[in-house]
Each structure stands twice: as structure tokens, then as C-alpha cells.
Image (cartoon, grey):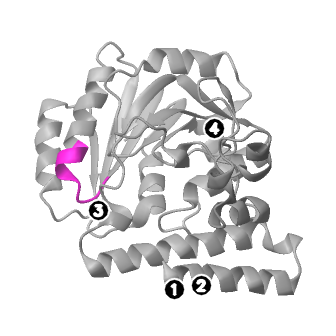
Amino acid sequence: MRIMAKLSIIILSYNTKEITLSCLQSLYQALRNNKNYQVIVVDNASCDGSKVMLRHFKEQHQDLILLCNQTNLGFTKANNQALKATDADYVLFLNSDVMVKELDFGEILKYLDNHQNIGLLTIKLLLPSGQIDPASHRGFPNLWNSFCYFSKLEKLFADIPPLNRLFGGYHLSYLDLNQIHEIDSPNGAFFLTRKHILDRVGGFDEKFFMYGEDLDLAFRIKQAGFRVIYYPLQQAIHLKYTSGLQQEDESTRKKIKSHFYEAMKIFYKKHYETKYSLICNKLIYFFIDLLYKFS
């Protein structure tokens, strides 16, 4: 069933029952004066009682669309699955660990309405510590940016202009975090784009199980001629590290770490491999494997 709306918010649920509930409560609080929206939650075969919680929440919020998968499809497939349920003008991919209680969606959508050349927008995502989530404010991981990040040169010169401009290309550490400006990519925690752009570029690339898919989609949105904007006039809290590499189960951590480093290879092969020599490419894949081994 397709529902026309101004904004569709897509949330993935996977074994984060209490945090997902807090996210939904904060979201409906933020949307209390806005009726032109749609919320879609995809549960990726959680085994912690999340499905029971979500069904109960849906009883209280009949407009919620709930999709429950029998297996974990991963981040990309589940998000693309939810996309098929909407024809909204705007689509927000929202992590289940992002709290948006104070967010003014009306202001953000008005800004996008007035700037049609913007294809992707994120807000100021703050960690519980009060610092910005660095993954929400990134340049693309080309060879130089990646080298500066992994060699710690970016961190070393982060507060020293103009060296931070030279070495801080991955997290764009030389830009003013209090001003609206263009970036290369946010993370998937708050990823607001237009439905017609997703239709045009094809949504998330399902070769990525998790990690890297946000960079890839932002890359393709920019390739299509649209701008990616960091909008700090609105902010939310990203709890972060409530799942993923911080999972307590050792086998789960190993699988997720494997996805993390495999995503690096997929992204490099897709967007950079043809620009460099065979020897250079072999070295890049060797160093990714080395990072995986010693991480």
C-alpha cells in the first residue's frame, strides 16, 4: 500500500528494543504538529522482543507502517524494502539511536523546498558527550583523505589552520560547524534526501550489507549534480555504539567487522579503482586487509 506524504521517515530496527522505542517516542513528539508525514519501521529479524514492542507501539499509532523480516537483510536491502512503501516527496533514513524530540521538521523541509539544487541534507548530530558525531560530517575517502585519517595526521593538525585544510579532508575539520555549508557525505544516521533522486540513482547499493552504503549513495547523489548540505541550525542526539561493532557477542562482532572492512573494498573498487594502476590497487587492498587483521 502506497501513501502520499510530504515526508517519509524510515527506521531500521535490529535488537535495540528500548532505544528504538525512545527514538520513536521522540520522533512522534517532534511530529506532533505535522500531519503530512509517514513513518516506516523495518524490523530485521530482531530476537530481543523488538517486534512485540513495535506491534504494541503500532496499536497506539495506527499510521505507523511496520515491516517485519524473517531474516536480517542488512541495512541496504531493508531500507530499499521500505522505499517501495512510499511516494513521499522527501525520505529521511533515521537510525534507531537518534533522538529528535526538539527537531523542527517544518523548518528543514522549507529550506529544502527553497533550495532545489540540494539533493541531500543532514543536521548537527551530537554525541551524548556534546561533541559532533564525526561520521556525520565527512569528505569522501579518497587516497589522500584515507591516508591522513589512518596515519593520524588529520587528528594531529585538526586545530592548526591552514594545516587542518591540508590534512583534514576526511572529516572536514577546517569547516565551521556552526555554519551551513556543503560536505561530501553524512552518515546514515540522519540522511534526508528526495524521493525522485533515490528513484533516479537507484537507492542504496545492496552490495553493501552495512557500512559504506551512505558514502556510496552520497557519492552518486553528487555525481547526479546535486549538493550535499550540513545544516547545523537543527540538531539531534546520536547515542551511537548501541549496536554494530560494539555488540557483546564475539561472533557478531567478527561478522560486523568483516562487513566494515569489506565495505572499504567495495567503495574503492566502485569509485576509485579505475583511476589508479594495478600495483596501486593491489597495495590498497593489501592495506585494507592489514587494517582488518590488526583492528
What type is the residue that disc 4 sits on? Answer: His
Q: Position of residue 149 (x, y in %)?
A: 65, 60
Residue bounds of the magenta highlight:
13-20
Going from the N terminus, do you reach mark 3 or mark 4 first?
Answer: 3
Quadrant in which the N terminus is drawn: top left
Labels 1 & 4 near each other (Cβ < 8 A): no
Identify the residue position indicated by label 2 in the image.
290
Going from the N terminus, do you reach mark 2 or mark 3 first?
Answer: 3
Identify the residue position indicated by label 1 in the image.
293
What type is the residue that disc 3 sits on? Answer: Asn
Labels 2 & 3 near each other (Cβ < 8 A): no
Tell me if residue 60 is in the magenta stretch: no
Judge by depth and name the residue closer to the eye, 98 or 203: 98
Q: The residue tagged with tag 3: helix, strand or loop?
A: loop
Going from the N terminus, do you reach mark 1 or mark 4 first?
Answer: 4
145 versus 183 height, above or below: below
- Rounded to the nearest angstrom, the CA distance separating label 2 from label 3 is 35 Å
Q: Within the image, what quadrant is residue 104 found in?
A: top left
- Rounded to the nearest angstrom, the CA distance separating label 3 from label 4 is 26 Å
How packed mark 3 is, by other alpha carbons closer than 10 Å (few <14, some 14-19, many 20 or more), is some
Identify the residue position indicated by label 4 in the image.
196
Q: The residue tagged with tag 2: helix, strand or loop?
A: helix
Let me know if residue 4 appears in the view: no
Q: The residue tagged with tag 1: helix, strand or loop?
A: helix
How packed mark 1 is, by other alpha carbons closer than 10 Å (few <14, some 14-19, many 20 or more), is few
